[in-house]
Image (cartoon, rainbow, N blue to C red):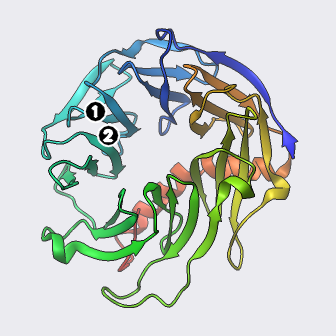
Amino acid sequence: MRTSHQLSSSDLSLPADTYIYHVIRITGSNLFASISSNDALRVIDESLQLLPSSAFDRVHDGVTCLENFEASAGCLVTAGRDAVVKAWDPRTGAQSLQLPNRTNAPYLALASVENKLAVGSELSNSKASIALWSICLNELARRGADKCTDGLVNLFDTTITDEDEALLQITNHGSSIHHARFLSSTEFYALSHDETLSIYSLDTIKGGNNDVPPTKFGDLRARLDCDYVVNISNLGDGNAVLGAGSHSKQHLDLVPLRHTSEWSLDLQHGIRLPTAHGEEIVRSMCFGTTEQTLLTGGEDGQVKAWQLPSDDVVADVAMSEESKDSKKRKKQDDLGSEKRRFKPY
């Protein structure tokens, strides 16, 4: 397995014993954002230098989620255990939006797609809820996927207000869901808290039986010599990268997940980040602005920048991430002239 080397590391001027929860690249910019266990939101450049005007403290009473706010370019959206959703503008250093509590339960999941925001709540009074907002009136047909501790992945048509009618598909993964996201317009993955991974196909007809069997990878811990899976970064065009970490052996491996005739893990072209975040868990990873850089955030309170090996395989992967914004814009332009029954993005 090829190895990378660390370029820099920063504690983002956060207090000791702070966890980094999540790190993302801000869409359309060379900047990155992070949230941490002390409820801080920080904006940094790729050299991990802080932007003083974009240091937000106490953004929530228990921040849990951070995403790009697609309804407003360059802005960020957060959610927390206070059951509130907020938007932030790093350019002005100000909060730009706050949405009211609609579930009376802590928010644990957040998604932003074009003009829509969705949040998922913690189980409260035997019920876990999904709240959905349309930021403007210009709605398009979309679907959403939610993740649950009951092991079910539910797909909804978010243009239908009746909950029973909106439910398109239920998939039983068999164990509590950690992450569930689309990999293409017809496929999505489910990753459980016990590190089992499967890729599923969508039913083409509501209520119909799906004849396409899932691709089951099973428990990834033995297969990838890891203790946990950070997440899967979907790069488009049948390419994704899985982050497999080991706090006991102190490394993070980037394993390509590719689709040719079927989905498979490309172990031959894996990349190891030696030492990673030491004995602490890597909570988040995202590709940088150049073709061979990666940012990680961990429970050691550090954000680290890594130089990945310089070869065609890695360049193709990173360039796919860099081109996602332009591809998404083209797809949005095409929506007015193309009729699609199903599109998750």
Q: Is residue 38 above or below residue 26?
A: above
Residue beneath the point at 50% across and 52% down: 193
Residue drawn at point x = 56 percent, y = 78 percent: 214
User: Where is residue 129, by image quadrant?
Assistant: bottom left
In this orientation, which residue lies closer to the viewer: 111 or 251? 251
Amino acid at the residue labelled 1: Ala
Q: Which residue is mark 2?
A: 72
Task: Give the residue number, with chain letter if any, for mark 1.
Answer: 87
> Mark 1 and 2 residues: CB-CB less than 8 Å, in contact?
yes
Mark 2 Cα within 10 Å, few/some/many (few <14, many 20+)? some
**Residue at the spot 70% in from the left edge and 18% down from the top edge:** 8
Residue 309, percent from left and from top? 83, 39
Judged left or right of residue 9, residue 339 is left
Q: Is residue 247 visible?
A: yes
Which residue is nearer to you in this view: 342 or 21?
21
Q: Residue at x 77, y 47 (%)?
A: 315
Is disc 1 placed on a helix, strand or loop?
strand
